[in-house]
């Protein structure tokens, strides 16, 4: 009788705090997964997320969507944990640095990143959403910044990110009161761009990403760089000129003009 080889051991269970990702039709979808802790951010998650946006970024991506697991939470910010106060403070500082690293990676990516807020976005989770190019929110979710209720002074870079998007007065109100806003109220002050029903959230975000992916990558990235330079007062005219020279010499511009003349969809290659 033939000997039956032993069954291979089952694969190890996935980490409870992790980043899931996939690329379909040049669109990178990223999910924050830590469902037992309201998708709270850990150092491990932030390191993995930074890698997915930088060194492990697929080369053919033209747009990305950032969302959370489940239907209750996009991200509740830094995992508070149960450390003693000294250890807690040091860990939170490391997570804050991780949030800034990821926010910088989002802003420096060569493609737009759309936040699809499937659930509540609180604290550092909301800051990651604010680093994205725009935000689509599920109707009924809550958004808020609670550092004043914890006794914490937020980072200057994080505060600046909100002030640039919604203005100084609204940033003061959001942070000083620590109150949460419903999605529609958040839309009224510019925290989110669109509010949709739960069943429409990801389809709407994907349609937006598809519209971006169909356009010329050099044009999209160039305008993204220039808009960022305008916000940072970092030589926007010089950067615009550099990218305009590149665009005028590109095959994509020739393809775009020819496609418009022939009334067909262009096929851009990023060249």
Image: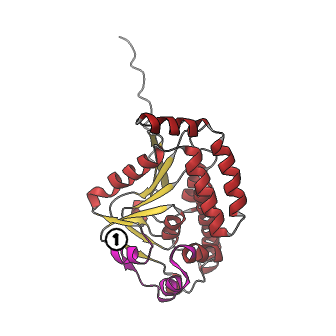
Q: Which residue is at the far top?
A: 1
Residue 189 colored in magenta in the image: yes
Considering the numbered disc 1 on the image, is that residue within a helix, a strand or a loop?
A: loop
Q: Nearer the viewer, residue 262 or 74?
A: 262
Q: Which range is magenta?
A: 164-192
Residue at 59% x, 55% y is 223
Q: Position of residue 86 (x, y in %)?
A: 64, 78
Could one spot residue 13 in this view of the protein? yes
Q: Position of residue 138 (x, y in %)?
A: 33, 65
Residue 147 colored in magenta in the image: no
Residue at 40% x, 16% y is 3
Using residue 49 as the reference point, say whether residue 201 is left or right of it: left
Q: Position of residue 105 (x, y in %)?
A: 61, 57
Magenta portion: prevailing SS class? helix
Q: Which residue is at the far front?
A: 261
Question: Disc 1 designates what residue?
Answer: 141
Q: Is residue 154 above or below residue 54?
A: below
Residue at 59% x, 62% y is 103
Could you tell me which quadrant the N terminus lies in?
top left
Could you tell me which quadrant the C terminus lies in?
top right
Q: Position of residue 24 (x, y in %)?
A: 43, 40
């Amino acid at each position: 009788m033939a000997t039956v080889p032993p069954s291979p051991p089952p694969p190890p269970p996935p980490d409870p705090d992790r980043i899931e990702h996939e690329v379909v039709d040049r669109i990178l979808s990223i999910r924050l997964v830590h469902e037992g802790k309201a998708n709270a951010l850990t150092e491990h998650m932030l390191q993995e997320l930074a890698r997915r946006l930088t060194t492990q970024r697929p080369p053919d991506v033209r747009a990305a969507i950032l969302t959370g697991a489940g239907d209750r939470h996009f991200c509740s910010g830094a995992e508070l944990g149960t450390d003693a106060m000294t250890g807690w403070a040091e860990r939170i500082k490391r997570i804050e640095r991780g949030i800034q690293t990821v926010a910088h990676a989002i802003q420096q990516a060569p493609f737009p990143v759309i936040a699809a807020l499937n659930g509540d976005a609180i604290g550092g989770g909301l800051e990651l959403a604010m680093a994205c190019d725009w935000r689509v929110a599920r109707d009924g979710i809550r958004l808020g910044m609670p550092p004043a209720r914890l006794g914490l002074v937020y980072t200057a870079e994080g505060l600046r990110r909100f002030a640039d998007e919604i203005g100084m007065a609204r940033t003061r109100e959001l942070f000083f009161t620590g109150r949460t806003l419903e999605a529609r109220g958040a839309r009224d002050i510019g925290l989110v761009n669109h509010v949709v029903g739960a069943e429409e959230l990801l389809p709407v975000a994907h349609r937006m990403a598809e519209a971006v992916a169909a356009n010329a990558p050099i044009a999209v990235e160039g305008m993204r760089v220039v808009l960022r330079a305008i916000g940072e007062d970092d030589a926007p005219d010089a950067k615009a000129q550099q990218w305009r020279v590149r665009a005028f010499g590109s095959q994509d511009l020739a393809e775009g003009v020819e496609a418009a003349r022939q009334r067909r969809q262009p096929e851009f290659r990023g060249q």
